[in-house]
Amino acid sequence: MSSDSLNLFSFRGKIKVLHLTWVAFFITFFAWFNHAPLLMAIAKSLSLTPDQVKTLLILNVALTIPARIVIGMLTDKYGPRLTYSLLLAIGSVPCFIFALADNFVQAAIGRFLLGFIGAGFVVGIRMVSEWFPARQLGTAEGIYGGWGNFGSAAAAMSLPTIALFFGGDDGWRYAIGLTGAIALVYSVVYYFSVTDTPKGSTYFKPKKIGAMEVTSPGDFILLLVMKVPMYAALALLTWKLSSGVALISNLTANLIYAGLVLLYLLDAYKTYSINREVLSNPPAPVHRYKFKQVAVLNLLYFATFGSELAVVSMLPLFFSETFTLDPVKAGLLASAYAFMNLMSRPAGGLISDRWGRKSTLLILTAGLALGYFTMSMIDAEWPLYLAVAAAMACSFFVQAGEGAVFAVVPLIKRRLTGQIAGMTGAYGNVGAVFYLTVLSMVSYQAFFLVICATALLGFAALLLLEEPEGQMAEVHPDGSVSMIDVA
């Protein structure tokens, strides 16, 4: 077997860590999307209106935006082993809250808090980057992301059956509660089964915590600009909750808007404090990285993972309403979209490792734009098998694109990998909030066309990306410099 191959049947060393880590990610997604295949049963049980159902979809991805930023920082500071274990344990609690909900407000609170567990993806990106060299990193990150992402498909395929097994009006409650119990148990298993780095390796930490470090004044400005959409997404959610379903009053909404503005200003000041020295005295060229690389990847993940989150949430309803299917069958057919994660995301990482990061992203981004354009034309006159095939073909480009994005993320700056992954991952949730809000106001066909248009914008931004090459420098605690290959 070549040095570039991975023996996935092994359960030692870095392969063991890879398997344990994708399972942790799998469980976070299994729990995070435990509502999607059970929406109709939940709506009936809690007497929810269509607007309230759509609001739950938006709430499910809202908290993940700030959570991924915070979890990225904590991962860089305290290591992925502790961070992932605590995230799984804490994330189990909202599962139980949602399972016990008796009305829309209680369900909304549980769904909002459960978005926190969606930040788990960020932790594994740093863990895998510590264990695998650059020549295997895209493939390893793709396996981690793809097999872990399959948790949403597993939820779609298994939870309706589990709910039927328990039976009655409360079957969905037992199914969702079970996902929380699994997360809680695995948090202990993961903590006692992995280490942050291979034996003898250094875990590089950021010099300061609280905001991302940049290495030039221009990058500082770009970082502040790229923070704006994350706050805008939370403002958009607030608007939806106040004007769409009247969950909060206009006064409360205005207070939240003011709070978001204040929070952004405080965030900008903290970012300035962290980077004050850089603005007056930029580091030597060997220690610099280009933040534009992060900005481009953010936009691409907005279109790829953002659309996946939105489509996974709405596809069962889309198939059910378009082809007049019962909820279980619609959920099983819709799971084909997420099912592609098993091969698509690893394929995106593998192709990036073999044939170049930028060229792979260009091809996959163009493919996903075409895929969503095709899905916009699906209607009741299409044969059902052809509609499912179109969704699966589209999902290949979407998820392979995600794998290709995170084949680049760990190659920008090692000690900041958690924070970079956190910001890029958060942009996926920004995309999901944006797309799901669009869905609440337009037809399914227009919804798919909007995703297509944003993918084309991502393609244009991608032209500015630079292919990772050479080495990155990191400083050991004793002041010595380590050079890490990125090609």
Image (spheres, rainbow, N blue to C red):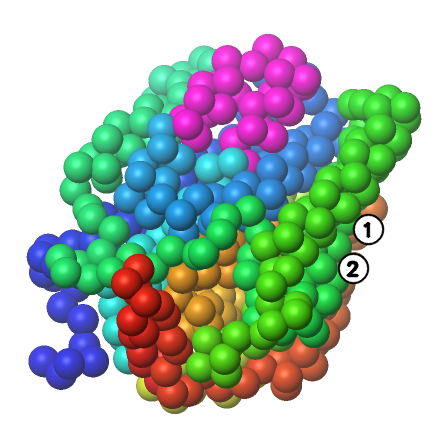
Judge by depth and name the residue closer to the eye, 45 or 413: 413
Instruction: Inspect this view and state whether residue 453 appears.
Output: yes
- Any magenta on residue 102? yes
Left or right side of 443 for 294: left
Residue 157 screen position, x and y as percent: 40, 42
Where 293 sits versus 214, above or below? below
The quadrant in which the C terminus is found is bottom left
Classify residue 164 by image quadrant.
top left
Residue 316 screen position, x and y as percent: 57, 44
Q: Which mark is residue 454?
A: none
State the separation of the CA atoms marked 2 and 1.
6 Å
Q: Which mark is residue 446?
A: 2
Q: What SS does tag 1 mark? A: loop
Dots 2 and 1: beta carbons under 8 Å? yes
Q: Residue furthest top?
A: 102
Instruction: Inspect this view and state whether residue 303 appears.
Output: no
Q: What SS does tag 2 mark? A: helix
Residue 48 screen position, x and y as percent: 69, 22
- Any magenta on residue 325? no
Residues rendered magenta in the picture? 90-115
Under mark 2, the amino acid is Ala
Local crowd size for mark 2, using a 10 Å CA cut-off: few (<14), some (14–19), many (≥20): some
Q: Residue at x 16, y 54 (%)?
A: 16
Left or right side of 394 for 176: left
The quadrant in which the N terminus is found is bottom left
Judge by depth and name the residue closer to the eye, 66 or 303: 66
Q: Residue at x 64, y 52 (%)?
A: 273
How many numbered circles are shown?
2
Q: Which mark is residue 442?
A: 1
Left or right side of 51 for 253: right
Where 53 sits versus 456, above or below? above
